[in-house]
Image (cartoon, helix red, strand yellow):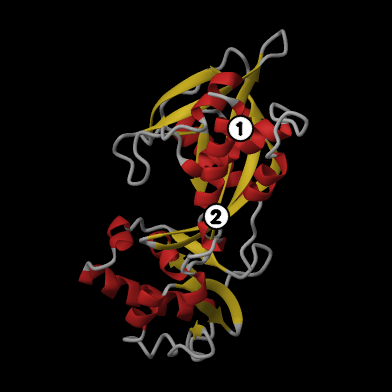
Amino acid sequence: MANSAWSEKILQLLRRMNNFYLPGSCRPHCFRFEINEAQVGWIPPHVASLLARYPEVFTPPHGGAVSLCPSLDTYGRRSEAVDAVLQTMRQEDNLTCLKGWRDEKYSVMSKFSDPPMMWMERAATSLFGVKRYGVHINGYTVSEGGEVSMWLARRSPTKQTYPGLLDNVAAGGLAAGVGIKHTLVKECQEEACIPAAIAEKAHPVTTVSYTYEEENGVFAESQFVFDLELPREFKPRVGDGEVQDFYLLPIDKVKELLVTDDFKPNCAMVVLDFLIRHSFIEPDTEPCYQEFVAGLHQTLE
């Protein structure tokens, strides 16, 4: 593929994963989701109309915002009240995303550095546009001659989301109350059978952030990215069944796959960031270098 065609495919990926910022998105019509006057998300209009049936939990839209009722004044009360509403909505079976209920609790806060204000079921987070955090690991090897190859995972065909697509060697969402490094070690062990003694050598390198909208709502996500140089003799193995296979591929092949429909989109962004940071993509030879960097680090306000 010619360089210009490859670059355009990457730009298309970044536009898709940041389409909430683009003209024509639902953003101008969304309501701010507020707790104690602090914005923690964006609620699409069709969701706001459903929430209006629960005035004991959500205030009517006012000044462009939907808020939790002031009487819900603790972490526990907020979490339990919203969860009860979501459980009811789940039974009504008219929101596709709630069919993927995971029984995973995600923290809700304005910024990652803020104390969580409540927890919310992972499958429901897109209905409120709350920020979701995860951990992604770039597993790679370096040959004696200095050539870099990357380990990629092929997701299980039974995965709830993006079945059968290429993924990072290990990745996972950040559950409420669980640390970043703990999540990294756990996901490495569970998904790729990478021992803790190796996984703990991973280096935190950046975050990749983006916001996109789909039928299921607004996905505001930020991934904590780690690089992990794996021993040349080590081969990841399928662990918990979320992956069907692993491949060790040269960087040129990884770069080629990056612009195909075979890659889970946010994982493609994490790999793109790796290619930039390790100088496999350079500003002298990539005219869209700045657009790539900007597209990987969009922060939702």
At a point 49% along the width and 86% down the height, the residue shown is 72
Helix, strand or loop under label 1 = helix
Above or below, comparing residue 298 to residue 167 in the picture? below
Is residue 55 depicted above or below 24 in this figure? Answer: below
**Residue 128 x/y as whole percent:** 45, 70
State which quadrant residue 96 falls in: bottom left
Q: Is residue 192 left or right of residue 55?
A: right
Q: CA distance from mark 1 to mark 2?
A: 31 Å
- Residue name at image x 59 percent, y 69 percent: 109
Q: Which mark is residue 186?
A: none
Q: Residue at x 29, y 66 (%)?
A: 95
Amino acid of disc 1: Ala
Q: Residue furthest left?
A: 92
- Residue 280's x, y, as percent? 69, 26
Q: Is residue 201 visible?
A: no
Q: Determine the secondary structure under disc 2.
A: loop
**Image-quadrant location for residue 288:** top right
Q: Is residue 131 above or below residue 296?
A: below
Residue in view at x 55 percent, y 28 percent: 195
Q: Position of residue 99 (x, y in %)?
A: 27, 59
Circle 2 crowding by C-alpha within 10 Å: few under 14, some 14–19, many from 20? many
Mark 2, residue position: 18
The quarter of the rendered structure image containing the C terminus is bottom right
Residue at image mark 1: 199
